[in-house]
Amino acid sequence: MRRVSVERVATVDSPRGEIVLLRRADGTLELRVNGVFVMDTAHTDSERRLARTALDALETSVSGAAGRPRVLIGGLGLGFTLHEVLAEPLVREVTVAELEPAIIDWYRNGLVPELADDPHDRRVRLRAADVTEVLAEQPSGSLDLVLLDVDNGPGYLVHTDNVTVYERDFLTTCHSRLSAGGVAAIWSAARSAELETTMRDVFETVRRSTVPVTLGTLETEYHLYLGIR
């Protein structure tokens, strides 16, 4: 079997473990945390769809029609969710909460070349902090979109502490920080009936959208959960 060449582009040891940015032989970048695959630049449609689907949902709501959206993103990753949000010229401001400072540094330093211009967008504020803390700081009704992509979903946590992001208390805080008609969107690699049930206990309207994905020879799908206030 031919060995696939992989280059370590950057590595850091954080209090939560080892974070590695890899480059495969075909040029694809891959982010891993403690050896767990998080995302890559080969399959970015679901990250982009997280933003686009939520923005489209907002357009039909009161807040979406009334002004320029204010957005909070939980998880920077390789920047593709943020990239899609910034492609919408009506977006007023975007705060990104990323737990790992190194990931912000890699992003600012242009290690994801196709997104090199995004860090200079004046609408963006990058915070090296837990999204639960950043959300709690926001005034009630001050956000129009909350986009959460901090794991591979509630069943595939990157850090065990992230379980709180999918629980009722945090989702209730999301609801309170959203404007009327605001949207909270959560990315998940697998369908989660428990998450959907919890969201229905909190939000007035809940929708699930699927994203078909081809991973090599494997045909699968990812899921986006939308809670609308």
Image (tube, rainbow, N blue to C red):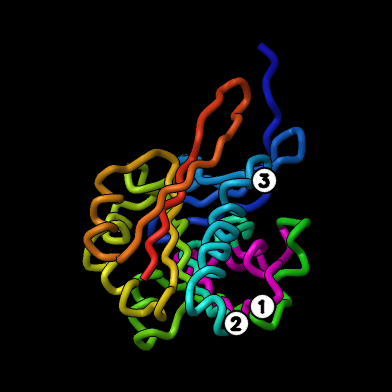
- Relative to 36, say whether 68 is above or below: below
Q: Is disc 2 placed on a helix, strand or loop? A: loop
Q: Residue at x 47, y 50 (%)?
A: 18
Q: Earlier in the sequence, mark 2 or mark 3?
A: 3
Q: Residue at x 63, y 53 (%)?
A: 10
Quadrant where the C terminus sits is bottom left
> How far apart are the two marked residues, 2 and 1, measured between alpha carbons?
5 Å
Which of these two is toward me, 207 or 11? Answer: 207
Q: Is residue 29 shown left or right of residue 189?
A: right
Say which residue label 2 marks.
68
Residue 90 disc label: 1
Which of these two is toward me, 69 or 148? Answer: 69
State which quadrant residue 112 falls in: bottom right
Q: Is residue 155 shown left or right of residue 109?
A: left
Q: Which residues are magenta?
A: 82-111
Residue 100 disc label: none
Q: The residue under label 2 is which amino acid type?
A: Arg
